Amino acid sequence: MSFQFLSLEADAEGIAVLTIRRPEKLNALNQALIGELGEAFRQVAADGAIRVLILTGAGEKAFVAGADIAELARPNAVETVEVSRLGQETFRLLETMKKPSVAAVNGFALGGGLELAMAATIRMGSPNAKLGLPEVKLGIMPGYGGSQRLPRLVGRGRALEMILSGEAIDANEAYRIGLLNSVVPQAELLDAAKAWARKVIANGPLGVAFAMQAVDVGFEAGPETGMRFEAMSFGALAGSDDRREGLAAFLEKRKAVFTGK
Ligand code: COA
């Protein structure tokens, strides 16, 4: 499927780059764009050749400056619940596709833009990045998962500080509180994201996928259930070619060649 607001390009290494292309509106997420994101996430999940997804925004100014404010005034209360659910479910596809993703935050990540970046596995930002949930300034509140993911990433106190003031923080502060994993000059941001992706791709695909799920299950259901899931996953890997190959390669002092089986 071809997209109006996105480009999705995969390379031979298994890295796909999804670029949100609406730079004249600072890549703001209208409903059509949310629909395209859902389609793109489904495509990436289904494509066995893609191992890591990188998300970024077109232009040098914005990752995504939020949900499209011009569209927000139109739906009534009941319809707005559905707008929120659709956004939440779309970002959840990214979070649960069992493949790591990197949000390359190349500028403003506000409102829905930060909510999208927080659904990615990790976030790398350029020095001009500004991250915030300014919804309360508009008389609304975060509606695409921000009230749930921000406290999980930075702790309840810092999350409430940001959500209730609506103030954005700069890249260094975001790095300091763990909202960005790293800060990289803008011209090197995509390369840095790809370098991390290559490190992941060199590892056992099943181990990577199971470890991601163990972290999520623990966050969602608590550590006791998480521990059980971890033990079951750890055990399941014992039957895999990846484990045989990984252990043998170490003992034979060679590089492992994993198949994800
Ligand atoms: N929704 C719709 N359009 C948006 C948008 C959004 N979230 N963010 C930016 N735009 C549009 C602007 O309306 C403007 O369009 P125009 O040229 O047709 O007037 C264009 O993108 C450029 O933005 P502009 O405001 O002129 O850039 P700036 O550099 O002066 O300011 C921001 C940048 C990010 C500070 C400012 O655009 C802003 O505050 N955006 C809204 C952020 C927000 O509240 N997001 C949460 C929404 S729930």
Image (cartoon, rainbow, N blue to C red):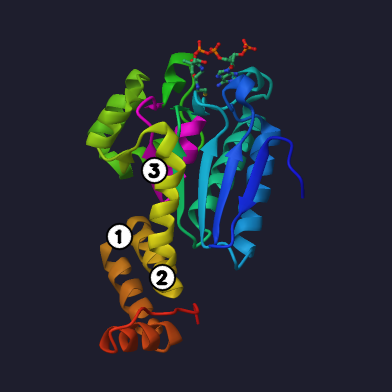
Kind of residue indicated by mark 3: Arg
> Is residue 120 among what the camera can see?
no
The question of residue 168 being in magenta is answered with no
Q: Where residue 43 sits: x, y (%)?
A: 66, 57
Q: Earlier in the sequence, mark 3 or mark 2?
A: 3
The question of residue 115 being in magenta is answered with yes
| SS at circle 2 | helix
Q: Earlier in the sequence, mark 1 or mark 3?
A: 3
Residue tagged 3: 123
Rendered residue at 58%/62% (across/down): 12
Q: Where residue 84 sits: x, y (%)?
A: 57, 36
Is 78 drawn above or below residue 209 in the view shown? above
Is 70 drawn above or below residue 58 in the view shown? above
Residue tagged 1: 222
Residue at the extreme right: 1
The label shown at residue 95 is: none
- How crowded pointer 3 is (Cα within 10 Å; few <14, some 14-19, many 20+) is rated as many
Kind of residue indicated by mark 2: Phe
Q: Nearer the viewer, mark 3 or mark 2?
A: 3
> Is residue 112 among what the camera can see?
yes
The label shown at residue 210 is: 2
Q: Where residue 220 sits: x, y (%)?
A: 37, 56
Q: Where residue 157 sits: x, y (%)?
A: 23, 33
* The one of 8 and 191 positioned closer to us in this rendering: 191
Mark 1 → mark 3, Cα distance in angstroms: 24 Å
Contact check, label 1 and label 2, Cβ < 8 Å: no
